[in-house]
Each structure stands twice: as structure tokens, then as C-alpha cells.
Image: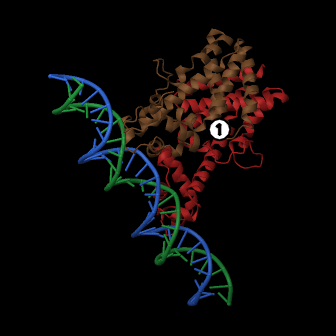
Chain colours: A red, B brown, C blue, D green
Amino acid sequence: MTEDVYSVDTTRTYHHGDLRRALIDAGLEVLGERGADALTLREVARRAGVSAMAPYRHFADKAALLASIAERGLEMFFAVIAEADGATDPRRALVQQGVAYVEFALDHPALFGLMFGHKPAGPGLPADDGAVTPANGFVTFRRRVSTIVPPDQAEQALFTAWSFVHGFAALALDGRIPDPRRTIRGAAEFLVERMAQG
Amino acid sequence: MTEDVYSVDTTRTYHHGDLRRALIDAGLEVLGERGADALTLREVARRAGVSAMAPYRHFADKAALLASIAERGLEMFFAVIAEADGATDPRRALVQQGVAYVEFALDHPALFGLMFGHKPAGPGLPADDGAVTPANGFVTFRRRVSTIVPPDQAEQALFTAWSFVHGFAALALDGRIPDPRRTIRGAAEFLVERMAQG
DNA sequence: TGTACATCAGTGAACGCGCGTTCACTGATGTAC
DNA sequence: TGTACATCAGTGAACGCGCGTTCACTGATGTAC
């Protein structure tokens, strides 16, 4: 409760302290409030209360900043999905994860778009190198899917379930699915039941 | 084979003849060759061999041109999917449509993105007003789905199948699905069989 | 504990760029008489 | 068939904009002695 404790956060010194993190936070804010088009280097710097050039101390260029924002988004995303895996019944747990997936997309449309935006690279295969990517961050999801189908169908079922939930999210964001927050659960149950008894 | 026949196409008169169509064609070209970022009014005009201002005779603004390009894309898309519905066996016909869906996306990634890009409006419900939209252009798809499930599951199955195929396409475009052109058929069969016997 | 100095993290002005769009125009076309 | 004139479909120069990024700089910090 001493002044020193607060001074770190409130007193604006010449040196920011943790500008890198502040810029990523600002980026998430912009994305949430004004969408992808508004996500410019200058706007992010403005939000962080810093000159337009300051970000270059922490990011090589705009692309690097975007990549870091996407990475943070993925961490949040995985956390939300893992947290949704509460039920003991595997089918129910899987449905919950699917619902969480779609809800995250609807809650953070621009961020979701950035996370899954077209990567220039894209070698195709989901990486297994420990990097934070949608593909290998899905440990919980993958595990649950493999418990409801025979082992030889695990991969097939994984891509089917992932495609379904991702497509539902994408179509919902486009306004092509009626009342998606209400219908996602039923749709997920529909699919999970059929996959499980196949 | 007379010169007159050709003069319509080759002789550049002051008045273009069908600039509106030519601009949309040029837009599709740009999208195919250089992607969404390169799709500017000026570039499209350049391709059509016309001044930067000429498009304004045919489109109110850039957004109107993009909308027309998207519309043409949807027409192509529906045609391709309807054409894929050749098999007599309903399940097989449905699988073929799914394959065509994903192949179209992979063949025209930027156009696919434009077609399904976030609409500012998006009332949610698939329109039934005869307008060309993904939702109601899917007559063939919708019909096939409803033949393989009980009537009371038709809507549920439609959104499930559509979400799956759309998500597979989106993930494939992001490079998150290994060898999607080869694996889409198996994945579609996997889903269709399970939906049909549910 | 004090001081010199290298390094780090920021500033602020300026740039070049391509864009969408405006403006006033001009050449070509079609139609009424 | 000829002509006057309104209308249509294009031109070309210019604008303002916000962007990403460069440049040379300066204030703050940390460390060796």
C-alpha cells in the first residue's frame, strides 16, 4: 500500500516499464472495439500513450506486432476451451468445448479472424513442435474426441469435429446461422451423438 | 469470321461497350492472381484498360464493385456445386457436393474470402427472398441433406453439414489441414455415413 | 558512495506511398424534328 | 436523309488522408571503477 507499489503502474515515467505487453493489450482493445481495419501501429501506440515510433523498440514491424497479438489471442482461446472441459461424461465435455469455441469467436470476432487469418507460410500439417498454434494447442479437444471413437477413427473424427465447430463459428460470424448462441449446443450434440455411435 | 464480328471485341472505341462486366472480370483476375489486398479500384480500372474514374459510371463506390464481384463469385460457386450433384445415390451426391465446395475454396481462396467476408449487415437468418446468398443458393445441397435424414432433423443436419464443409474449407485455406484435396472426400464420407445412420 | 559513460527506450518531425474520391472536362452516341 | 442537341461514358489532373517507416535526436537507466 506504499506509494512505491503504485508508482510502477500510475506514474508515467519516460521509460514505460512493460510497453511490449501494453501494446499487445492495446491491440486487443482496438480489435474488440473497432475491428481489424482500425488495428494500425499508430492507433495502438496512441492507446498505449506513446509515440508512433515507440513500438519499433519492441517489434520489428507491424506484422510482428500482429503476430504477437494473435499469439495472445490463441492463449486466451485455449484457456477458455480447456476450462470448458469440466464435465465427466466425455460426450458432454466435448459438446461444452464446442460451445466454448463458438462463443469465443462470437465474443471476439476480429481477434478470431486475426488468429485464423491466412498465414503466408502455412506448411499444411498441424505442427507438433510445441509452438502455440490452433492445431497443437487443442490437446484437450483432441483427447476428448479420441475417447468417443475407435482409435483408428481418431484423426478422422478430430478433423471432422474441428471443421464443424470452426465452420459453425465462421458462418455465425457472417450472420448466416440463425441465433447461433442458442443453436450451437443442439448442433454440437447432434454431431457428437452421431460420431460416438458410428 | 468477318472483321465486324471481331471489331466489337478488339477495337477499342471511346465507349467500352460492356465496361461493367469487364470490371468484374478484371476484379476476379486480380483476386486470383494477387489476392484480396491487391483488389483496389485503381488496379481493376488499370486491368480493364480504362481510367481510374471510369468505374464510377457503373458502381457507386468501391464497396459496390466488391459486392458485384462477390455476387459473381457466388453464381460460379453455386454452379460448381450443382454440377457436382451428379450421382444417383444421395449419399454419394452429397459427398461430391462437399468435395466441390472445398475444392472451389482452394481454387479461389481470395474470392471465397470475399464471398463469405463479414457483411456489415447480417440479419442472421438465411434469406428466402430469392437474393443470391450462400444460404438460399444452396438448393441442391439442402435437398440432398434432407433426403438422408428424417424430416424433423433436416434443419439440424443442414447446418451441421454446411458448418463441417465450410470449416474444412476455411481450415484448409489456413494450412491447418494436411493435404486437404486428398482428405476431404474421406472426411465427407465419414460425416455423411454417420448422419445417415443416426 | 560517487561519478563517467555506454546502453537502452523513448521522442518528434518528416517522407513517400497508393488509395478512394472530387472536379471540371470532352468525345461519342442516340433521338426528335 | 440531315442536322441540333441532350445525354451518356469516358478522361486526366488533383485532393486529402492515414498509413508504415526513416531519421537524427534525447532523456533515463545501469554498471564499472
Residue A85 at x, y percent in the picture: 70, 34
Q: Is residue A29 visible?
A: yes
Chain of residue at mark 1: B
Q: Residue furthest top?
A: B151
Q: Is residue A89 visible?
A: no
How many marks the image carries: the answer is: 1
**Residue drawn at 67 percent across, 24 percent down:** B98
Determine which residue is flagged by label 1.
B173
The quadrant of the picture occupied by the C terminus of chain B is top right
Q: Nearer the viewer, residue A132 or B177?
A: B177
Q: Amino acid at mark 1?
A: Leu
Q: Nearer the viewer, residue A185 or B72?
A: B72
Check the image and report above or below for B146 versus B32: above
Q: Residues within 10 Å of mark 1 (few under 14, many from 20)?
A: many
Q: Nearer the viewer, residue D11 or A8?
A: D11
* SS for dot 1: helix
**Residue drawn at 52 percent across, 46 percent down:** B38
Residue C6 at x, y percent in the picture: 62, 81
**Residue drawn at 61 percent across, 52 percent down:** A67
Classify residue C23 as left or right of residue A108. Answer: left
Classify residue B162 as left or right of residue B59. Answer: right
Residue B72 at x, y percent in the picture: 51, 29
Check the image and report above or below for B168 versus C12: above
Residue A153 at x, y percent in the picture: 81, 28
Check the image and report above or below for B144 versus A105: above
Classify residue B108 as left or right of residue A85. Answer: left
**Residue drawn at 47 percent across, 36 percent down:** B10
Q: Nearer the viewer, residue C6 or A87?
A: C6
